[in-house]
C-alpha cells in the first residue's frame, strides 16, 4: 500500500485553504481582516461642540480597541449636508463613517431643496448618543430669568437667538415662540456650537440654546444665565432649572429630544457595523467616556444600531411636522 507522508497532507491542506480565501469575494476578505488601515470619521460641524467632542473621545476608545488610528475630519457647511454627502459617496468598506446631529438626517430633508444624499438609502445607522438636555441661555445684559420674561423683553427689544444650524432644536424653539407670541426674534445660524457661543460671549447674541459642555465656560464666568430647558426632563447639572413645560409652555416644540448619530455608507458589511456599534456603546463606560458624560451632562447610554434604527423612525415622526411648520426652504 502506498504511504502518504504527513507533511504532504499539511501542505495540501494549506494550499486548499489559500485557494478558498482567494476565491472569496474581495469585500468578504476585507471584512474578515477589518480594520487594516486608518479609519476616518467625518464630523459635519465645526470643532468645539458636543458632536465633535463625542466623536473624538469615543473614536479614541475605538481606535485603541481596534489597533488602528481613527482620524476625525471636520467638514462643516450647509447645515451638515456637505460632510454627510462626502460619506454617502464613500466606499462602504468600513473605513469612513459620519458623526452628525439627528437634524442632518431628519430636519434637513424638509429644509433643503437638494441634500446631495438620501438620508434613508445612502446610510446605515451604527450607534446614537443622546444629545442631552439643551438649555436656553440669555446674555447677562438681558434682564430675564424665565421664558415669560424673555417673551416680554423680546416684545420691546431686539433679540438675536443663536442656532447651530437651520432646523435645529434652537431654531424650532425660537420660531415657535415667535409664532405663538407674536415676536420677531431673529434666528442666527452658525456652523456648529463653537462659533455660536463665541458670539454669545461677545454680547452680539442675546439668547441661544445648546449643550452644557459648550456653554459651561460662559456660565461659570457669569456671561450667560440659563432660563429654561426645552426637554422632557430636568438635568442634574442644573437641577433647579425648570423645563419649559413646567413653566407652562406645553407645545411639542418645547419638549425636544434628539441624538448624535454615527452612520456608515449603505452597503458597509454588517459585521463591521455591529463591531463599531458595540465599541461606541462600550466607549460610554470607558474612563474618557465617563468624563465626557459628566462634562456634557449626559445620562442615557448610547443606542445599538438596532435600537438606533427604531428610534430613528420615532424621531422622524415627531420632528418632521415641527420642521414643516417652520416654512423654511434652503438651497
Image (cartoon, rainbow, N blue to C red):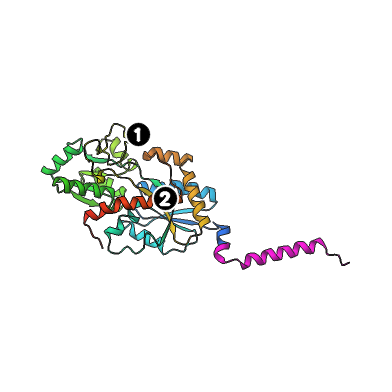
Q: Residue at x 70, y 65 (%)?
A: 16
* 14 part of magenta stretch: yes
Q: Residue furthest left?
A: 156
Q: Residue at x 74, y 65 (%)?
A: 12
Are discs 1 and 2 less than 8 Å apart at CB? no
Q: Residue at x 76, y 61 (%)?
A: 10
Q: Quadrant of the N terminus?
A: bottom right
Q: Secondary structure at mark 1?
A: helix
Q: Quadrant of the C terminus?
A: bottom left
Classed neighbour count for the residue bearing mark 1: other residues with Cα under 10 Å, few (<14), some (14–19), many (≥20): few
- Answer above or below: position of 203 versus 88: above
* 274 part of magenta stretch: no
Which one is in front, 190 or 126?
Answer: 126
Q: What is the C-alpha distance between the residues marked 1 and 2? A: 25 Å
Q: Residue at x 31, y 40 (%)?
A: 232
Rendering quarter of residue 301:
top left
- Answer above or below: position of 12 versus 285: below
Instruction: Please report the bounds of the magenta region as a residue range.
Output: 1-28
Find disc 2 in the rendering and name its residue: 308
Whichever of callouts 1 and 2 sits on the residue coming sooner in the sequence is 1
Visible residue check, residue 46:
no
Q: Position of residue 50 (x, y in %)?
A: 36, 46
Q: Position of residue 94 (x, y in %)?
A: 49, 58
Which one is in front, 13 or 305?
Answer: 305
**Mark identifier at residue 236:** 1
Q: Position of residue 152 (x, y in %)?
A: 13, 40
Q: Secondary structure at mark 2?
A: helix
- Answer above or below: position of 235 versus 259: above
Q: Main secondary structure of the magenta part?
A: helix
Which one is in front, 305 or 285?
Answer: 305
Amino acid at each position: 500500500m502506498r504511504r502518504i507522508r504527513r507533511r504532504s497532507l499539511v501542505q495540501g491542506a494549506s494550499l486548499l485553504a489559500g485557494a478558498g480565501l482567494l476565491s472569496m469575494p474581495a469585500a468578504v476578505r476585507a471584512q474578515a481582516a477589518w480594520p487594516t488601515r486608518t479609519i476616518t470619521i467625518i464630523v459635519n460641524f465645526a470643532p468645539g461642540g458636543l458632536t465633535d467632542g463625542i466623536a473624538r473621545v469615543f473614536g479614541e476608545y475605538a481606535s485603541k480597541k481596534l489597533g488602528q488610528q481613527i482620524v476625525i475630519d471636520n467638514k462643516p457647511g450647509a447645515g451638515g449636508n456637505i460632510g454627510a454627502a462626502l460619506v454617502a459617496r464613500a466606499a462602504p468598506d468600513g473605513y469612513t463613517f459620519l458623526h452628525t446631529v439627528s437634524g442632518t438626517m431628519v430636519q434637513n430633508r424638509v429644509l433643503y431643496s437638494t441634500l446631495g444624499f438620501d438620508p434613508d438609502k445612502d446610510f446605515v445607522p451604527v450607534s446614537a448618543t443622546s444629545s442631552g438636555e439643551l438649555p436656553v441661555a440669555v446674555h447677562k445684559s438681558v434682564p430675564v430669568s424665565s421664558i415669560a420674561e424673555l417673551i416680554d423683553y423680546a416684545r420691546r427689544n431686539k433679540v438675536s437667538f443663536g442656532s447651530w444650524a437651520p432646523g435645529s432644536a434652537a431654531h424650532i424653539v425660537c420660531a415657535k415662540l415667535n409664532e405663538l407670541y407674536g415676536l420677531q426674534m431673529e434666528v442666527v445660524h452658525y456652523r456648529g456650537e463653537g462659533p455660536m457661543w463665541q458670539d454669545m460671549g461677545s454680547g452680539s447674541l442675546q439668547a441661544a440654546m445648546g449643550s452644557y459642555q459648550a456653554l459651561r465656560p460662559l456660565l461659570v464666568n457669569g456671561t450667560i444665565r440659563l432660563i429654561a430647558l426645552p426637554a422632557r426632563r430636568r438635568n442634574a447639572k442644573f437641577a433647579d432649572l425648570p423645563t419649559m413645560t413646567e413653566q407652562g409652555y406645553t407645545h411639542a416644540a418645547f419638549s425636544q429630544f434628539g441624538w448624535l448619530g454615527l452612520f456608515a455608507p449603505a452597503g458597509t458589511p454588517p459585521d463591521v457595523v455591529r463591531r463599531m456599534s458595540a465599541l461606541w456603546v462600550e466607549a460610554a463606560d470607558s474612563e474618557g467616556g465617563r468624563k465626557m458624560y459628566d462634562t456634557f451632562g449626559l445620562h442615557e447610554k448610547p443606542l445599538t444600531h438596532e435600537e438606533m434604527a427604531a428610534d430613528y423612525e420615532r424621531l422622524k415622526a415627531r420632528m418632521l411636522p415641527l420642521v414643516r411648520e417652520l416654512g423654511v426652504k434652503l438651497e
